[in-house]
Amino acid sequence: DQQVKQNSPSLSVQEGRISILNCDYTNSMFDYFLWYKKYPAEGPTFLISISSIKDKNEDGRFTVFLNKSAKHLSLHIVPSQPGDSAVYFCAAAYSGAGSYQLTFGKGTKLSVIP
Amino acid sequence: GAVVSQHPSWVICKSGTSVKIECRSLDFQATTMFWYRQFPKQSLMLMATSNEGSKATYEQGVEKDKFLINHASLTLSTLTVTSAHPEDSSFYICSAGGLVSPMGSATQYFGPGTRLLVL
């Protein structure tokens, strides 16, 4: 049972335009959400996060939106740059035994076309 | 952000041998580290939570005798794949952080990963 879903395996966007990556979750116990960027054969790099008490968090070109009622979050990148091309993973977290455990989606491969 | 290193970055071994992977937090102390596994074009799957000075907590379906985890210090956790077989070939990634505390956050910082190929 996949608790975190990224239904688009890939996305292509023109440089300078907005990239919107979507993520849905099913477990209402998740209280923290994160986006990671990953290149092949490398570990994920943390991008931005949002707690369940907020509905928006912005950091430079990256904005994450959370819709708790729909159990949906999205990552907006604007303007998109060729260096943004990578696989983006959505992760959801809940606290357990003193630590947060992350559940990852399958990722969306973003290609930014110059 | 915090820096986490892994060693080795890749390893090739014969079936039946054991392989040790080290995960270090370089600029902070990590009482908790996590070990993940990623298959090609798949998501990261949490294998276990490594707690300094105590036994690791394994996820369902992960053999604790197969994947030995030791977290002997606040900056080092090791994963040993014992008697490795070709099906153990994968990309193993560790992370640190994600503590629940007044000053903690869910953010985990990941190492660069270790690619294991068992022949």
Image (cartoon, coloured by chain):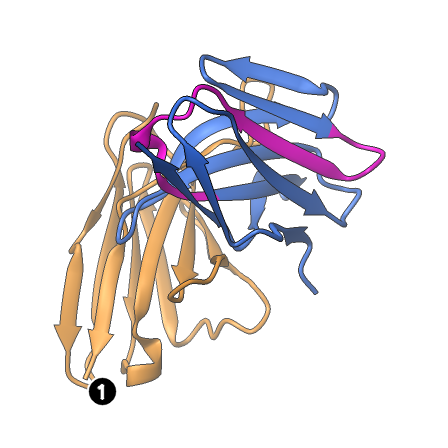
Chain colours: A blue, B orange
Is residue A68 within the magenta segment? yes
Which one is in front, B27 or A59?
A59
Identify the image quadrant of the N terminus of chain A: bottom right
Q: In this picture, is A31 found above or below A48?
A: below
Name the residue rendered at 57%, 45% in the picture. A101
In-image side of B90 versus A78 (left or right):
left
Q: Is residue B105 visible?
A: no
Is residue A29 within the magenta segment? no
Q: Position of residue B75 (x, y in %)?
A: 29, 37
Name the residue rendered at 66%, 40% in the picture. A94
Which one is in front, B42 or A92?
B42
Which one is in front, A17 or B55?
A17
In-image side of B3 versus A25 (left or right):
left
Q: In this picture, is B88 found above or below B52?
A: below
Q: Position of residue B32 (x, y in %)?
A: 44, 41
Q: In this picture, is A12 found above or below A53?
A: below
Residue tagged 1:
B16
SS class, disc 1: loop
Q: Which residues are magenta?
A: A67-88
Q: Position of residue B10 (x, y in %)?
A: 16, 61
* Residue B91 figure quarter: bottom left
What kind of residue is marked 1?
A: Gly
Q: Is residue B62 visible?
A: yes
* Residue B105 figure quarter: top right
